[in-house]
Image (cartoon, rainbow, N blue to C red):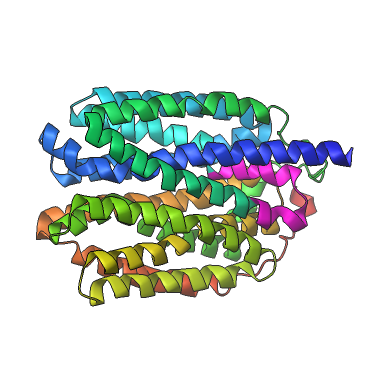
Amino acid sequence: MNNALNQKAFWILTAGSLMLAITLGIRHAFGVFLVPMSIDNGWGRETFGFAIALQNLIWGLSQPVVGHYADKLGAKPVMLVGGLLYALGLFGMATGHSSTMLIISSGFLIGIGLAGTTFPVIFGAISRVVPAEKRSFALGVSMSIGSLGQFVLLPLSIVLLDYQGWSYSLMMLCVLSLFILPLSFIFSASKNNSSNTKNVTHSTPFVLKSALNSRAFQLLCLGFFVCGFHVLFIATHLPGYLTSHGLSAMSGSIALALIGLFNIFGSYFAGVLGGRYAKPKLLSAIYFSRMIAIVFLLAIPLSEITVYLFAAMMGLLWLSTVPLTNGIVASLFGVEHMAMLGGIVFLSHQVGAFLGGWLGGSIYDLNGSYDLAWFIAIGLALFAAAVNLPIKEEAHHWDEHHG
């Protein structure tokens, strides 16, 4: 029985990691399409920035609902629908030339597709089949393999873009996204009935109310808001920031690739350290270190070397917050409703992402500079470092009279 569980856990961990590599790898490459798509279609940078920002907002708004159904029905049907929507959205991006089509395809379709094929749903499925003492490590491994997809698919997208243009490149990414569908079938038995889950029967409204009234949960959401702002602002606007300062477009592409590369190691070690040390303290250290990295970028004369050093530093801190944050959710509330509660925390992340993506383009269009956006990112990093410190990883006390 234990051997069967271990085998099941291995395949779910493998399939989930590969799915993250595809979904996050494709998403990480969107920044390199900002300039060519904007030029060819006569858009300002705010148009593309708004579409990507909306994608993240839709992703976040749909994530708790999608997570709820994954908790109740299992991950497989949610992933199948999410994978189809993701592919359809990429097809729309590749073939459409209006801002309306960009918003529908990139904003709505891909946004909902990501909700069904990324962190909360996958981490919820993994957490149910992995022993609690190995959970942080498993989530770190999954996140690091997902980060490998970011490192691989970004240069691949650039090669395709240079070869046949942005439309062809997006069409090839659409084909790649279809591999999500067969991977989802491995999750057929991963719904909330594993031996790793306690038989608790709290209702969904009760669980939501309890989580939203938890101070630790509130602080976790506030910190993850900042993570979203940082990630989408940098991923979407770093290439444009560099070209506006006289560096080549290739410098921005290499910087994003380095972020993906070093993110592999950052995510893995975050998972390892999260099993040994207090995860809230680790999160606080990560956000404070992001502040140092951004100050370094702005304070040191800009060159390819300084940009690549910044990318390496930021890569180590990039998505290392994800396994730690989801691990805290599991520590606080268990795994029965993890996809839904993780989805709520992720909603906060995506509200921050929306602001990071949209404000970045808006500030640039208004001022011809990204400086104000960078200063906001610095202040938010200090805020996130502060709000994570008081969080305690103590299991939530459920009021049985209201369960």
Residue at the location (66% across, 48% down)? 207
Q: Main secondary structure of the magenta part?
A: helix
Q: Is residue 175 magenta?
A: no
Q: Residue at x 71, y 34 (%)?
A: 190
Q: Residue at x 74, y 55 (%)?
A: 134
Is 105 displayed left or right of 207 in the figure? left
Q: Is residue 223 above or below residue 180?
A: below
Q: In the rendering, at what x and y percent does residue 145 appear?
A: 55, 47
Which is nearer the eye, 266 or 89? 266
> How far across and down, in percent of the image, does residue 117 sit?
52, 35
Q: Is residue 213 visible?
A: no
Please name whichever residue, 198 or 304, is drawn nearer the observer in this view of the structure.
304
Asked where in the image residue 318 lies, by quadrant, the reply is bottom left
The answer to whether residue 284 is above or below residue 363 is below
How many marks overall?
0
Where does the magenta region start and end?
119-138
In the image, 143: left or right of 137? left
Residue 124 is a magenta residue: yes
